[in-house]
Amino acid sequence: MWKRKDLVGLRDLTAEEINLVLDTAKAFQEISLRPVKKVPTLRGRTVANLFFEPSTRTRISFELAEKRLSADTINFTSSSSSTVKGETLRDTVLNIESLKVDIIVMRHFASGAPHRLAQALPVSVINAGDGMNEHPTQALLDMFTVREKKGTVAGIKIAFVGDILHSRVARSNVWGLTKLGARVTLCGPRTLLPKGVETFGVHVTTDLEEAIHDADVINLLRIQAERQSECYFPSIREYANNYQINREVLKHAKPDVLIMHPGPVNRGVEVSSDVMDGPYSVILDQVTNGLAVRMAVLYLLSGVRKKRWGTVPVSPNQT
Ligand code: CP
């Protein structure tokens, strides 16, 4: 049974909790194949989507998941809100909480922002990506996709290639995948590997061929120029020469390797267009699976309410 009020990261989750989300998502997957793609599970509940940083996939995926579960939704983007007039995050959130929302989905450029919110408020908080820290629902949908395509996560070898330093997707995946028994490799230029990466409990290399030669899955990460205040490599062209996954490079990979990417993709940089659109790519399957995973997370959290004295599980039918 799910007992957490919030989902702020995978670092503290157990393998059992991760598997519960993945199993619940499997059950929700079927709803999107029905002619009428809607169930009354969250009828009467209100979800606020607070996005303080740009997003395409995560924002529309949460919004559609909420609609499929019949929740009422509030959509907030900082660029069109009173934050541009100087209102603080705390005041913005207190105003939204005054509307008696049940769940807050939050993306924020500051690492730890959803954690602080979760501690301060009695409502459930879902982290939709915080700074360079975690992006738990992205990692859950990545694991769901690996399990769907390879039959299991345990024992599967997954290589992450690219800007590991700035990647919250890589961090959440490392915490989640290692708990489920996957073998993880992190690969990128030395300057884009985080300090202390040797403590992550994964294999680390700067050599692309070494990273991919026995990988079952290659998960590509974008160079996050918006988070880089200094030069980490001489040029995008040199980066692509050394780390781009293209047809030539894939000759060194397994014939049934899967190519994954959380998006947004910089075509022609971390991956060539023909590989992105080719038979190895499951990038759009990841997006499809994200909907079922987010429906599962919303459903599981809707069954737990926090009282001042602690967290209590309640039946999803209880209102
Ligand atoms: N994967 C991901 O987080 O994409 P968005 O930034 O478009 O939400």
Image: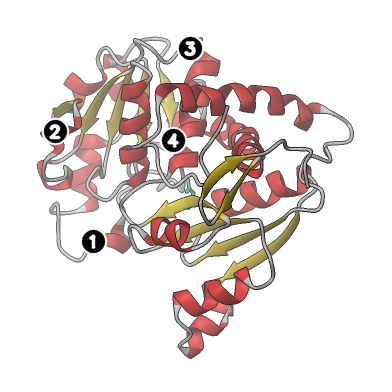
Q: Nearer the viewer, mark 2 or mark 3?
A: 2
User: Amino acid under label 1?
Assistant: Gln
| Cα distance between the residues tagged 4 and 3 | 16 Å
| Cα distance between the residues tagged 1 and 4 | 23 Å
| Cα distance between the residues tagged 1 and 2 | 23 Å
Residues packed near mark 2 inside 10 Å, few (<14), some (14 to 19) or many (20 plus)? few
Q: Earlier in the sequence, mark 1 or mark 2?
A: 2
- Relative placement, left or right, of 250 versus 5 is left
> Residue under circle 2?
199
Q: Nearer the viewer, mark 4 or mark 3?
A: 4
Q: Nearer the viewer, mark 1 or mark 4?
A: 4
> Residue under circle 3?
150
Q: Earlier in the sequence, mark 4 or mark 3?
A: 4
> Residue under circle 1?
228
| Cα distance between the residues tagged 2 and 4 | 20 Å
User: Label 2 CB, ligand 1: below 8 Å?
Assistant: no
- Marker disc for residue 139: 4
Q: Is residue 211 visible?
A: yes
Considering only vertical position in the picture, is 143 above or below 40?
above
| Cα distance between the residues tagged 2 and 3 | 28 Å
Where residue 47 sits: x, y (%)? 67, 56
User: Amino acid under label 4?
Assistant: Ala
Task: Identify the residue at horizontal 37%, vertical 42% (top origin).
Answer: 169
Q: Earlier in the sequence, mark 2 or mark 3?
A: 3
Task: Identify the residue at horizontal 15%, vertical 37% (top origin).
Answer: 197
Q: Quadrant of residue 25?
A: top right
